Image (cartoon, rainbow, N blue to C red):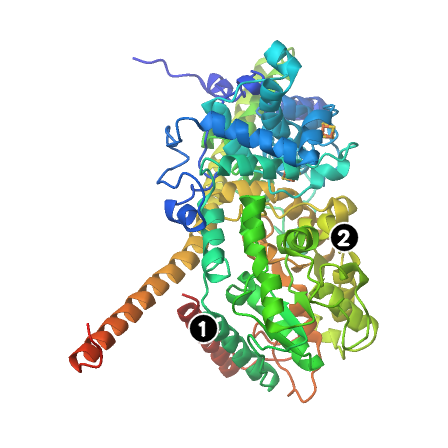
Amino acid sequence: MKLYNLLSEKKSAILNRWYDAVLDTYPSDTSGFLKGQKNPFLNPVGSTIFQGIENLFEELLYEKNPHSPPHPPLTQGGQERGKGGMGGLSGERASLFLDNIIRIRAVQEFTPSRSIVFILLLKNAIREELKNELVERQLLEELLFFESKIDDMALLSFDIYMKCREKLYELKVNELRRLTFGRLQKADRIDKQENDLKSNNNEALERKEVNK
Amino acid sequence: MSKTPKADELSKIDYMPPKSGWMDTPVEFKQGFWCYGSKAKSLETVGFPNPRQWSPADEDWKLPENWQEIVLKGFKERLDKYRSFKVFMDICVRCGACADKCHFFIGSGDPKNMPVLRAELLRSVYRGNFTKAGKILGKLAGARELTYPVLKEWWYYFFQCTECRRCSVFCPYGIDTAEITMMARELLNLLGLNTDWISGPAANCYMKGNHLGLEPHAITGNIEYMLDDIESITGIRIKPTFNRKGAEILFVVPSGDLFADPGTYTTMGELMLFHELGLDYTWSTYASEGGNFGFFTSNEMAKRLNSKIYAEAKRLGVKWIIGGECGHMWRVLHQYMDTWNGPADFLEAPKSPITGTVFENAKSTKMVHIAEFTADLIRHGKLKLDPRRNDHLKVTFHDSCNTSRGMGILEEPRYIIKNVCSHFYEMDENTIREKTFCCGSGSGLNASENIELRMRGGLPRANAVKDVVEKYGVNMLANICAIDRAALPPLMDYWVPGVGVTGVHELVANALVMKGEKERTTNLRGEPLPGVVETREERRKREDRRKEVGRRRKREEG
Ligand code: SF4
Ligand code: SF4
């Protein structure tokens, strides 16, 4: 549990490193803004990322500790979610925290790997922040275990990323379907009208009502 | 064999963005962030230059050989014609106050979405060609040549601006980047570089009077279906008139509200309100579009499309005009119509026949926003309202960019909502009224192929909705704009699922107690009113009916 104590102790330094690394995935003209603007309404990207990585970090720490108190209930959409503190990384809590960040990155101009790389950047942040301490064997072993949890999150991130993308396709298809359907119907009707007109005309010709 | 990178290396590989300056970072067209190019046919219909088959993704945009000359000539003409344009090109001190105010920048993190940089795309060419310093010093003075990549960059980024004007609220010099975007789009238009989503509707509107190309029988047919629905909900058969000469008022709505939910519920609401008042008004199947996608191509085109409104008012001999719930429609009507196609001296200053109120603000244009009209009715106690019918709703209000920043309609819709609903909650003050965040799909950007762009552009708006959802359990996002009613449902679906979208007059009609109505059990959407328990049989009937109405409507709208 030594590593976990260290991580808790250095939480804010690690988080800052992590946050900086995530923001570095944005153009330099932008990262300053994402970092500087603290009002969440004026900077939803920066604030969601910061809030998100903090929650994720706590989730990772909580994971290991059997004495952790039960989670406070998650609230979203005015309803309680994820009751009972499942804790596990496939759990709803981790998914929700990841979702908040990935949902944003899925509509920014990142490749899929870049969209979810942010979670792996935590490894670098920890290694750098604890580089003096990480010479001890016991710590290294614990670190390996901890990092495998980060890998779990990366895998989970991939699922979430795909869900976000699927949602986007669904929205696109829904809109297109509405349009195409209308157009097809219209084409159909025009076709029908033209045919009606033609046969009317032909009949009229046959009856010699009109001269050609 | 290639070397497999280690995990640690992998995470470091090229996630860093390029470090070059903006002028040297060429634009890369990424799927999801741009709209399809305009079709030859649409351009031909309205007589726009360079009609041809092309795709923005193509290397070759099939431009006329002298395209640079055409653009620069057009640039010069506009600098001479519009003093504001010239001033906006000259006076920006690059203070950066506007930089972080654009929803597209906030949502994307792409520096070229900073209003100041967006404008700089054009300004750099201005400097290079029309200022002495720029001609001599070149890049040192922030000047550059008009090259093919620059042109492509223009196209990419000026169709990533919704002309929402949020940036202009914060500029100490009052520079309106929306107007710069308008000019840039005009210049692009000289080369036939518009989007299908804009030029298609503009061409439809030119031929048939509305963006969807609905012909008169489709318009009346769609409204008939709404009347059927109203009758089954209220027991009242409404009989509106079409193209009736001698009516006192002409009513013009954005055509989206005639065919797509939830906009149709807004139209039903308006029909019910006018019926209840016994208003002497008529619909026109010719001036059947208040919106104006021509506005997103050029000033001249917008003027042409707009001319039908006064012309129809004159033909029918009405006294004044009411306009439906829309955003950009009102920017055009309120700020341009009078100078383009006025003075409408054959009309009278709008005076509510119910309250006697004269709408001084519309004395010149002769056209009143329905939110102003209805707020006035409520203020004078002319409507019998039962807000409890909306008790299952926790409502917040999204100010659309055009009605708030363009014409200052801030209080009226709120006043109406508070009178017809019991639960109303404001979003954060930084995101409403003049500072409202755009839906992300305005100015003709509400196509489907650019959904990623729309989602990230709408993030600041959705983020503020999410907050009131979490704090108060808000479940309904009200607005007075037809583009909002089309664009916000997918936006909510992506960011804050479970939040509905409604026009204000849908809420009004649900609360409106009409003379001789039967006891209502459902709202306009056919959902049971609060406190009404629906039997399984009733539910089945309701769903069947919904399906049938959907089918019929689709058949008709074609
Ligand atoms: S706020 Fe106005 S002056 Fe300052 S950079 Fe923006 S446009 Fe230029
Ligand atoms: S007008 Fe709106 S979309 Fe355009 S640059 Fe300004 S804030 Fe951005």
* Element type at mark 1: helix
Q: Is residue A84 above or below residue B76?
A: below
Say the numbered circle drawn on residue B288: none
Q: Identify the amino acid type marked 1.
A: His
Which of marks 2 and 1 precedes in the sequence? 1
Q: Is residue B511 above or below residue B51?
A: below
For the C terminus of chain B, give its image quadrant: bottom left
Q: Identify the amino acid type marked 2.
A: Gly
Task: Give B165 or B47, whichever is nearer the viewer.
Answer: B47
Q: CA distance from mark 1 to mark 2?
A: 36 Å
Q: Give how far across and how far down residue B511 sits, in percent.
A: 70, 75
Q: Which residue is mark 1?
A: B217
* Element type at mark 2: loop
Q: Give how far across and how far down residue B114 sits, in percent.
A: 64, 30
Whether discs 1 and 2 lie on one chain: the answer is yes
Mark 1 chain: B
Report the image quarter containing ligand 1: top right
Q: Which residue is mark 2?
A: B408
Q: Is residue B456 above or below residue B323?
A: above
Q: In this orientation, does residue B159 appear?
A: no
Relative to B57, B499 lies left or right: right
